[in-house]
Amino acid sequence: MRSPFANGMNLPMMYRVFLLVIILLGIGMPQAEAGRALSGAELKRLGGTYKAVWKGHKARVRLNRDGTLIARSGTKVDVGRWQVRGNKLCISFRVWTRGKYKCGTVERQGAWYVGLRRSNGRPRLKFRR
């Protein structure tokens, strides 16, 4: 069996090439690192439809680019607004939050976005595509 280093490439050079490939593949990846709070710029790109859990209740939520949102949980529908303040996502539902904004950081945990934590550290919201 022929050695993979027979072409003259030494082991340290192979590591450098391997690291370069990893770095290049990681450039421009849209997903946040697990456990790291998303930046304001990343939060602003969250528009779209998500499966969500709001305070333990399952819903389908649509975040529109104009800052409006609509959520359906079973037969119940609520509308509201979403915005980014600094590095925090702020959500307001007409009924579910009585029109008051709930703001907090959001982090990536696997396929889920988790955040807007309560004072006890438990998240109010988690959502995924």
Image: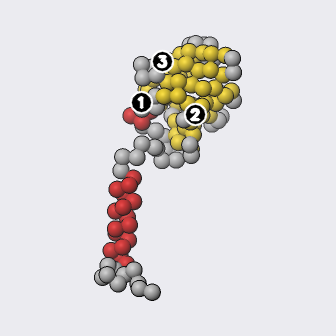
- Is 115 drawn above or below residue 72 in the view shown? below
In the image, residue 67 lies at what x, y percent? 45, 20
Disc on the earlier residue, 1 or 2: 1
Structure colour scheme: secondary structure
SS for tag 1?
helix
Give the labeled residue for mark 3.
68
Q: Give the distance between the C-alpha atoms of the residues marked 2 and 3, in whole angstroms.
A: 17 Å
Q: Amino acid at mark 3?
A: Thr
SS for tag 3?
strand
Of residue 85 and residue 114, the one placed in the foreground of this image is 114
Give the labeled residue for mark 2.
127
In the image, residue 129 lies at what x, y percent? 54, 35
Q: Is residue 114 left or right of residue 4?
A: right
Residue 50 is drawn in which quadrant?
Answer: top right
Give the labeled residue for mark 1.
44
In the image, residue 78 lies at what x, y percent? 60, 15
Disc on the earlier residue, 1 or 3: 1
Q: Amino acid at mark 2?
A: Phe
Q: Is residue 100 left or right of residue 41?
A: right
Q: Amino acid at mark 1?
A: Lys
Q: Quadrant of the N terminus?
A: bottom left
Q: Give the distance between the C-alpha atoms of the residues marked 1 and 3, in whole angstroms.
A: 13 Å
Disc on the earlier residue, 2 or 3: 3
Residue at x 67% of width, y 16% of height: 76
